[in-house]
Amino acid sequence: MEKKYSKKMHIAKMKRFIVALEKDKPFVIQVKNKKIRIPAEAEISIEFEKDGKGNELEFQIKW
């Protein structure tokens, strides 16, 4: 499931996520009408991929 947002909307969502991380609180986000709850203890990583089509940077959250 993937949803593209404007830069302004993406920044707003990331700011909310950062505040939740700083406060060690869970984060709730809605993607395509589905609410997703990310617990405070979720594992966060960054992945970089480079291939013939271009570059990709992903912020991954696993729980």
Image: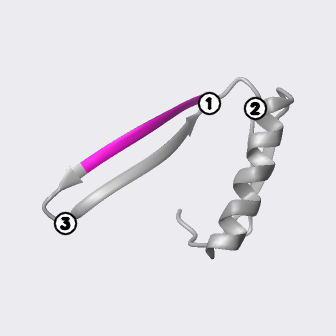
Determine which residue is flagged by label 1: 63
Q: Residues within 10 Å of mark 3 (few under 14, many from 20)?
A: few
Residue 52 occupies quadrant: bottom left
Residue 7 occupies quadrant: bottom right
The span shown in magenta is: 43-49
5 relative to 34 in the view: left or right? left
**First reached walking from the N terminus: tag 1 or tag 3:** 3
Q: Position of residue 44 (x, y in %)?
A: 57, 31
Query: Quick one: SS at disc 3?
Result: loop
Residue contact between numbered discs 1 and 3, judged by CB atoms under 8 Å: no
Query: Quick one: SS at disc 1?
Result: loop
Which of these two is toward me, 6 or 61?
Answer: 6
> Measured along the vertical axis of the image, is residue 21 above or below residue 15?
above
Q: Position of residue 1 (x, y in %)?
A: 53, 62
- Amino acid type at image mark 1: Trp
**First reached walking from the N terminus: tag 3 or tag 2:** 2
Residue contact between numbered discs 3 and 2, judged by CB atoms under 8 Å: no
Residue contact between numbered discs 2 and 1, judged by CB atoms under 8 Å: yes
Whether residue 60 appears in magenta in the rendering, the answer is no
Q: Main secondary structure of the magenta part?
A: strand
Determine which residue is flagged by label 3: 53
Q: Residue furthest left?
A: 52
Which of these two is toward me, 33 or 6?
Answer: 6
6 relative to 55 in the view: left or right? right
Determine which residue is flagged by label 2: 39
42 relative to 58 in the view: left or right? right
Q: Colour mode? A: one colour
Q: Position of residue 58 (x, y in %)?
A: 44, 48
Specify the label residue 46 is tagged with: none
Q: Residue at x 34, y 55 (%)?
A: 56
**First reached walking from the N terminus: tag 2 or tag 1:** 2
Single out the mark in the foreground, 1 or 3: 3
